[in-house]
Amino acid sequence: MLDRATQNELRALEESQRERIAGHLVMAGRLLEEDPESALAHASAAASRASRLAVVREACGIAAYACGRWEQAIRELKAAMRISGSVEFLPVVADCERGLGRPERAMALAGSAEAERLTQAGRVEMRIVAAGARADLGQIDAALVTLKCPELGDRKVREWSVALWYAYADMLQRAGREAEAIEWFARAAEADIDEETDAATRLQELLD
């Protein structure tokens, strides 16, 4: 139930402890969407016994984020990145800063040297967060500029496409550019085969 990288990291533990931690991580993953509080409880139980493992701190951070516990999520995800040397969760940390009402900090993270180390998918995710931070400050036009990147015009559906197209459509609607918003909500809805967003609903509301 755990990916190979996680299993490899857990090998640093004694066998009896490894099984217990693995069980908590599996349950945290299973419960994350339907019961994030319980997921966080499992992740926290794992962290109480193996706080030096990046994968454990990551699980705590993601579960705390799902629960809207922004400060805890920041603390855990920063610990995970410090242990692993990765910057993977920097966009999530930036979004937590937004959740705490600190959009300026989110934008600072988006412009940081660490953000330059993100993968292409991570950079797109950070753009979406930075655009949201701009919108938090009432800077809708600047948010639209932030989202205008080469990935936005890529017609092929990639892992970031739905989130990026949805964010752009949302900002267009906020800017009063409804005809363009319809186009981008339609694109997002068509690509969102797993219905991870409400793009189809937003599109219908604009068409009615």
Image: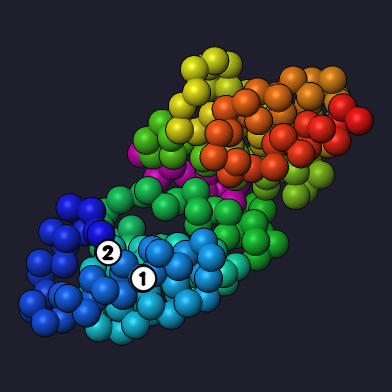
Left or right, 28 with reference to 102: left
* Magenta-drawn stretch, dominant element (helix, strand or loop): helix
Q: Is residue 83 or residue 23 the one in the foreground?
A: 23
Label of residue 60 in the image: none
Quickly name the residue at label 2: 54
Identify the residue shown where x is 46% and y is 27%. 158
Kindly tell me whether residue 193 is visible in this rendering: yes
Q: Quadrant of the N terminus?
A: bottom left
Quickly name the residue at label 1: 27
Q: Quadrant of the C terminus?
A: top right
Is 107 magenta? The answer is yes
Amino acid type, mark 1: Met
Is 156 magenta? The answer is no
Q: Which residues are magenta?
A: 106-117
Task: Tell me the CA gap for discs 2 and 1.
Answer: 17 Å
Q: Secondary structure at mark 2?
A: helix
Precedes in sequence: disc 2 or disc 1? 1
Left or right, 181 with reference to 55: right
Identify the residue shown where x is 60% and y is 41%. 195
